[in-house]
């Protein structure tokens, strides 16, 4: 059973460009979480999605950031007009379909560098 | 809001020795989970151990065990017989199981170096 997959693993963008980060959850998982890790920091929650629904986006910056998890395909974290401060590692985690699951399985992360 | 504090930014231990990493948290919730994650240089987040707050018995996974003190809101990780492969960042994390979102709140981490 393949684990959580994220691509690309490394992404370089110039200031003002768009960044798209993809996350394919484990098979059978329909819950996805996105976290951001700034240098020398712990991970910080951004958004929680189920298929076709955003459940909790309390950690998302108000502007330029959006996330989706369509019925088919991976979850996408989109950052428009990137700035240097967006440089970070972005992790997604997935959890099983049954409710009340606290077990989150992490992907390897995408390291975004904004030049 | 929950907060997680790891007061030791860096620690080192001799191979085969025992080391304890500290973690305290602040919450008004009664039902929650606590976790320790390991992040080696590959940056992959690896779950080391989890503890359910309603369980009084401390969790154990092979060489890893926790000391969970609910009243003190303390959740330390003990690594016995340290191995070179244990060198990594260790993050303590909290999850409020009573909420609709099972987001994890992480501490800032402790960088552990195992010395040969």
Image: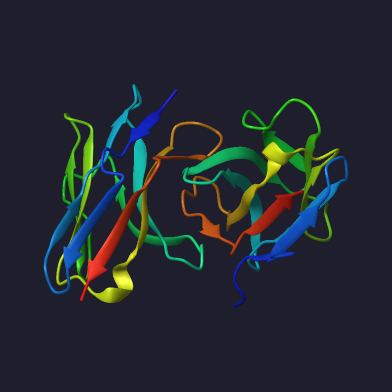
Q: Residue furthest front?
A: A115
Q: Compared with residue A63, is residue A93 higher up or lower down, i.e. above or below? A: below
Quarter of the picture holding the C terminus of chain B: bottom left
Instruction: Count every numbered label the image shows and give the total.
Output: 0
| Residue found at x 51% / y 68% | B42
Q: Is residue A1 above or below residue B72?
A: below
Residue A52 is at least partly visible in this image:
no
Assign the N terminus of chain B to one quadrant of the image: top left
- Side of A13 relative to B69 (left or right): right
Question: In the image shown, does B107 or B61 lie closer to the viewer?
Answer: B107
Task: Give percent across and percent down for residue B84.
Answer: 28, 75
Vertical side of A62 occupied by A40: above or below: below
Answer left or right for A27 relative to B39.
Answer: right
Say which of A42 and B24 sits in front.
A42
Please give the name of the residue rendered at 51% of the width and 54% of the height, measured from the top-left corner: A104
Q: Residue furthest left?
A: B17
Picture coordinates of residue B86, whole percent (x, y): 30, 69
The colour scheme is rainbow
Quarter assignment of residue B60: bottom left
Picture coordinates of residue A73, whole percent (x, y)? 82, 61
- In the image, B76: left or right of A90? left
Left or right, residue B98 beside residue A88: left
Res. B2 image quadrant:
top left
Q: Report whether residue B63 is seen.
A: yes
Q: Which quadrant of the structure image shows residue B81?
A: bottom left
Q: How far from the left and from the top, in percent, is residue A76?
A: 78, 51
Residue at image point 85% right, 39% down: A80
Q: Nearer the viewer, residue A47 or B12?
A: B12
């Amino acid at each position: 059973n393949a684990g959580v997959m994220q691509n690309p693993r490394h992404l370089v963008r110039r200031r003002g460009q768009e960044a798209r980060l993809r996350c394919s959850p484990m098979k059978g998982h329909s819950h996805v979480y996105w976290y951001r890790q700034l240098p020398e920091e712990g991970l910080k929650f951004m958004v929680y999605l189920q298929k076709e629904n955003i459940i909790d986006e309390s950690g998302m910056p108000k502007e330029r950031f959006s996330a989706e998890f369509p019925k088919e395909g991976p979850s996408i974290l989109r950052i428009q007009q990137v700035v240097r401060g967006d440089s970070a590692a972005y992790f997604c985690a997935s959890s099983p379909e049954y409710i009340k699951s606290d077990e989150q399985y992490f992907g390897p992360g995408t390291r975004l560098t904004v030049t | 809001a929950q907060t997680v504090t790891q007061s030791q930014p860096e620690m080192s231990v001799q191979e085969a020795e025992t080391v304890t990493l500290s973690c305290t948290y602040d919450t008004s919730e009664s039902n929650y989970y606590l976790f320790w994650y390991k992040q080696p240089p590959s940056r992959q987040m690896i779950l080391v151990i989890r503890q359910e707050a309603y369980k009084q018995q401390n969790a154990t996974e092979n060489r890893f065990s926790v000391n969970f003190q609910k009243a003190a809101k303390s959740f330390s990780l003990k690594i016995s017989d340290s191995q070179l492969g244990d060198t990594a960042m260790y993050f303590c994390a909290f999850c409020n199981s009573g909420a609709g979102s099972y987001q994890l709140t992480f501490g800032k981490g402790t960088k552990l170096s195992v010395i040969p």
